[in-house]
Image (spheres, rainbow, N blue to C red):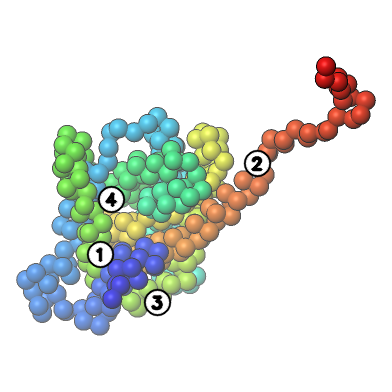
Amino acid sequence: MHIKRTIERIPGGMMLVPLLLGALCKTFYPEAGGYFGSFTNGLISGTVPILAVWFFCMGATISLKATGTVLRKSGNLVIVKALVAWGATVLAAHFLPIGGVEKGLFAGFSALAICAAMDMTNGGLYAAVMQQYGSKEEAGAFVLMSVESGPLVSMFVLGSAGVATFEPQIFVGAILPFLIGFALGNLDPELKEFFGKAVQTLIPFFGFALGNGIDLHVIASTGLSGLLLGLLVIIVTGIPLMIADKFIGGGNGTAGIAASSTAGAAVANPMIIASMVPALAPAAASATALVATSCLVTAILVPILTGLWAGRMKKNQPTLAMPEIVPPTTAERPPIVPAE
């Protein structure tokens, strides 16, 4: 049986399939963790410790050795994505209730959901797409995008937008595992390789634990809203990213579209942040469902849109015409000199 291969055919499958299994467990057997206890309960309810280890290992994979082109591309896209997410979060905080919209087309929409969906790019998706449609340096720009992984950027955005207040030590605690992993990975290449192997392995585990915080009835009520959020992420972040890529990054806008996705890791942020800020807890479950749907929607649409835009740019790119070779006329031909 090719279970892994089948799961990987689904965009973000290694995250979304375990998340769905966890949601099924939460919906039909909500007391399973308490009933089995021990290690089974740890897998079901251990979102924070599993994510802490994943965040540490992710930090170990980030290298200081990157070219100026890669850093320019990465920094440009990361900063613009964060600024756009901040602006959208400020608007959401002004117009939406802190606990989220309860019904209607925008059911589940909240500042927490919008921030989590918009401030993190799916780095793996970006690298794969740009490997096909961009340059090697553009594909390598996903390196700095990995810094977005985890709740830190979301915490900065929510804090600066006035949605939540975080004590300084909370910020330190959120990034400390990442920084320790980052330091060890750069001090010792063998540790970088050792911890880096765990990054992909841990994804299904925290996906399952996250799913155990979602009731499928919530997803049913926010399914259309999740689709709408995914489209908004592409439009609202994609257009500024395209402009920034063209006028700051020196590209043609392709990298901007490729970065207009929702990261799979963003699904964890609403629950993590809500555990730090109890006022956001009412919005956490629906925000998680919305972000999960947005992740799937953008994972499907972003590669298609990137390919269409790259094809258009290639078609419009001027090509150097080959000089036409005209055979000389009889009058232009050199005279034939008879051999002596």
Q: Residue at x 42, y 52 (%)?
A: 128
Residue extending furthest left?
38
In depth, the one of 50 and 224 nearer the eye is 50
- Label 2 sits on residue: 317
The disc at residue 220 is 3
**Mark 1 closeness class: few <14, some 14–19, many ≥20 residues within 10 Å:** some
The disc at residue 204 is 1
- Where residue 297 appears, as percent x and y from the top left, is 46, 64
Q: Nearer the viewer, mark 4 or mark 2?
A: 2
Vertical arrangement, residue 202 with respect to residue 247, above or below: below
Q: Disc 1 on helix, strand or loop? A: helix
- Label 4 sits on residue: 150
Q: Nearer the viewer, mark 3 or mark 1?
A: 1
Amino acid type at image mark 1:
Pro
User: Real-space Cα distance between discs 4 and 1?
Assistant: 16 Å
**Mark 3 closeness class: few <14, some 14–19, many ≥20 residues within 10 Å:** few
Locate residue 24 relative to residue 262 in the image: left or right: left
Q: Tag 1 or tag 4, which sits nearer the N-term?
A: 4
Q: Residue at x 15, y 68 (%)?
A: 43
Q: Tag 1 or tag 3, which sits nearer the N-term?
A: 1
Q: Nearer the viewer, mark 3 or mark 2?
A: 2
